[in-house]
Amino acid sequence: MNSNPSPAAVPAHVAIIMDGNGRWAKSRGLPRLEGHRRGAGVAQDVVRWAADAGVKQISLYAFSTENWERPHDEVTGLMTLLATMLTMQVPAMKKEGVRLRVLGDVSALPRLAHQAVQHALRATAKGERIELVLCLNYGGQQEILAGARRLAQSFRAGEISEEALDSMSPADFRRLLWRDDLLPVDLLIRTGGEYRISNFHLWDAAYAELYFSPEFWPDYSREAFHQALVGYQRRERRFGLTSEQLHAEVSSPHE
Ligand code: IPE
Ligand code: IPE
Ligand code: MG
């Protein structure tokens, strides 16, 4: 079967919930951290697969605001892994034209992990082939709440009028979120067989196509990723319109 996605209609922004590291490890009698270590290698691979397919932005959910509640040893292990793997991956990222961005409150990360992130951000700043948005200490509800708080502060400080507040559009509000330079999520993939969003990209995934994969993240393959891209190309994205409207717009475009 040819599962290579055609260059037409490649999603510009793909977001991935990389789930199943722990179960992958458990099923082999290995410590959970070994699953995370393998998963970090696949994370590096998927950025390359995405860049090769023509994806412009890829968000990887690496650590959620809720993941701090995991056992202390797992959190510490994940943070150490982040620091070492990210530092190791910088030369390859530079070579492959990957520009790192981060989404989430990285100031709350332990010092070594924070330093590794800052170093990788600087070292890859010239990458032009693909943007890797690493989501660290990220929570969609927290992001929207922070935006609402910023808005309230601006209003209190008199920087925004009552009229401007009343006529505010979703696009206006979007500028108050943690990053104002992300594309809307076109395709949201979750591995590991669970069917939920787990507080990821709540705003930007409003019209994302959802794709759920049964594999545990360390088993994720280029073929599975290509199947998701091909699946995406078969969807009809209607954005609230009817199918007939979309076809009419294609056959008789506005002047
Ligand atoms: C995802 O894998 C990685 C992180 C959340 C950091 P999990 O660790 O959630 O793996 P499962 O879901 O327990 O198998
Ligand atoms: C989501 O996975 C977070 C990451 C992949 C970083 P979780 O494993 O934490 O989500 P739940 O707990 O199954 O919803
Ligand atoms: Mg999980």
Image (cartoon, grey):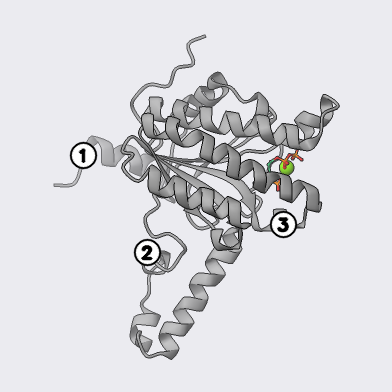
User: Is the residue indicated by label 3 positioned so its CB lies within 8 Å of ligand 2?
Assistant: no
Q: With 28 as the anchor, is 182 left or right in this view?
A: left
User: Along the line of sight, which residue is nearer the eye, 61 or 170?
Assistant: 61
Q: Is mark 2 within 8 Å of ligand 2?
A: no
Q: Is residue 48 visible?
A: yes
Query: According to the image, label 3 marks what residue?
Result: 68
**Marks 3 and 1, how far apart at CA:** 52 Å
> Which comes sooner in the sequence, label 2 or label 1?
2
Marks 2 and 3, how far apart at CA? 31 Å
Quarter location, residue 237: top left
Side of 91 where 77 appears, left or right: right
Ligand 1 image position (quadrant): top right
Seen at 76% across and 29% down, the residue is 24
Circle number at residue 252: 1
Report crowding for label 3: few under 14, some 14 to 19, many 20 or more residues within 10 A (C-alpha). few
Front residue (pair 73, 16): 73
At mark 3, the secondary structure is helix
Query: Visible in this render: residue 96?
Result: no
Tag 1, which secondary structure?
loop
Q: Is 14 left, or right, of 126 in this rendering?
A: right
Amino acid at circle 3: Trp
The residue under the point 34% across, 41% down is: 246
**Image position, residue 91 (x, y; %):** 43, 33
In the rendered structure, which amino acid carries the disc numbered 1?
Ser
- Frontmost of labels 3 and 1 is 3
Distance from disc 2 to disc 1, alpha carbons, whole Å, reads: 28 Å
Pointer 2 residue? 171
Determine the residue positioned at 54% across, 58% down. Answer: 104
Q: Earlier in the sequence, mark 2 or mark 3?
A: 3
